Image (cartoon, grey):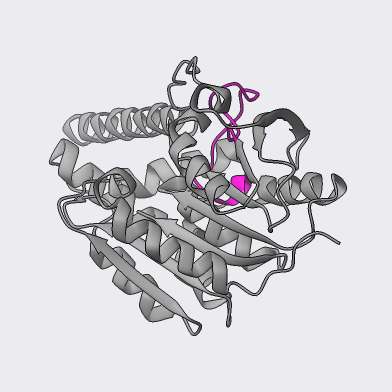
Amino acid sequence: MTGLTGLVLIGLVGLAGLVAFSFLAAQLLIHPPRRAPSHLTPESVGLPFEWVTFASHDGLRLIGWLVGPELSKPPVVVLHGYTDHKSSYLDHARFLFDHGYPTLLYDQRGHGESSPAAVSLGPLEAADVGEALRMLAERGLGERFVVWGVSMGAATALLAASRFTQIQGVIAESSFERLDHVLADTVRLRFHVPSFPIVPLVLAAASLLCKHNLFRVHIGDAVAALGDRPLLLVSGAEDRRMTPEHGRRLLARSSGPTEHLVIAGADHAQCWPLGKAVYSESAHKLLETATVVGRH
């Protein structure tokens, strides 16, 4: 009996340790390290812009730049990835400005200069996109938009498009298909340990902490909801986390005009600098063919 009691105690201590580890890992997942804001602004690369501040769907302060507010084509919202910030996408803004599109770059919740907050890797951020669209519409910049996202920003863009019909086209680079799957791949590749039971426990803890069910973050379902709106999927051929297979699975869920572009030699979120010639051509095609209307 004593031996059995000892085994039970050891098991309970082990379980308690695993749960404590899961909550610690979940805290780190939804509160990623904040990179210091860059000194670069659109002015640094010769682009006219305005600072903008707007509230997230739950009242947080989000800070960004509106580049080329005087341009008449439909606005494009550019969404950065996990632990990144708006300054990394000035070359995207330059490309869009040169083709006549105003661009909104902003630091997503819990990133850059925006308010500290729990990050959900997609769903909460997608709700914030709705507020960004509202702000642009209130400024008289039209009621139809294109969203361009990278990594977490790509997943956010697709989730947002599935919710907001004002989004008439999406460019999604290095998106994952399912959050639980990509976390399992990350655990396997980085830590060389089995994903079970760590990933389910971490996701459960993260869901409690950010008050959203992260088990239900299925980007394929969002792609299926786009209908006939154009979509450009971009994958890095050397990306071991969001592999081209993620893009192929998302492509299979699409029923509208969709292109899947795989950039040779590109790792995660490196597709734009390494494949700019072909990438920019496909992006321009999507922008021109998206069924959007400009200012009224």
- Residue nearest the observer in this picture, 202 or 94: 94
Residue at 67% over, 31% down = 49
Q: Quadrant of the N terminus?
A: top left
Residue at 38% over, 63% down = 281
- Mark yes or no: residue 163 visible: yes
Lateral position of residue 140 relative to residue 69, left or right? right
Residue at 70% over, 64% down = 164
Q: Quadrant of the C terminus?
A: bottom right
Q: Main secondary structure of the magenta part?
A: loop
- Mark yes or no: residue 196 visible: no
Q: Position of residue 101 (x, y in %)?
A: 62, 52
- Residue nearest the observer in this picture, 289 or 161: 289
Image quarter for residue 264?
bottom left
Q: Position of residue 14 (x, y in %)?
A: 27, 31
Image quarter for residue 177?
bottom left
Lateral position of residue 97 relative to residue 296, left or right? left
Residue at 30% over, 43% down = 273
- Residue nearest the observer in this picture, 212 or 287: 287
| Image: 279 above or below 97 | below
Residue 117 on the magenta span: yes
Q: How many marks?
A: 0
Q: What residue span does the magenta drawing correspond to?
A: 106-125
Residue 178 on the magenta span: no
Lateral position of residue 177 relative to residue 139, left or right? left
Q: Position of residue 181 (x, y in %)?
A: 32, 57
Q: Position of residue 238 (x, y in %)?
A: 16, 52
- Residue nearest the observer in this picture, 226 or 274: 274
| Image: 82 above or below 101 | above
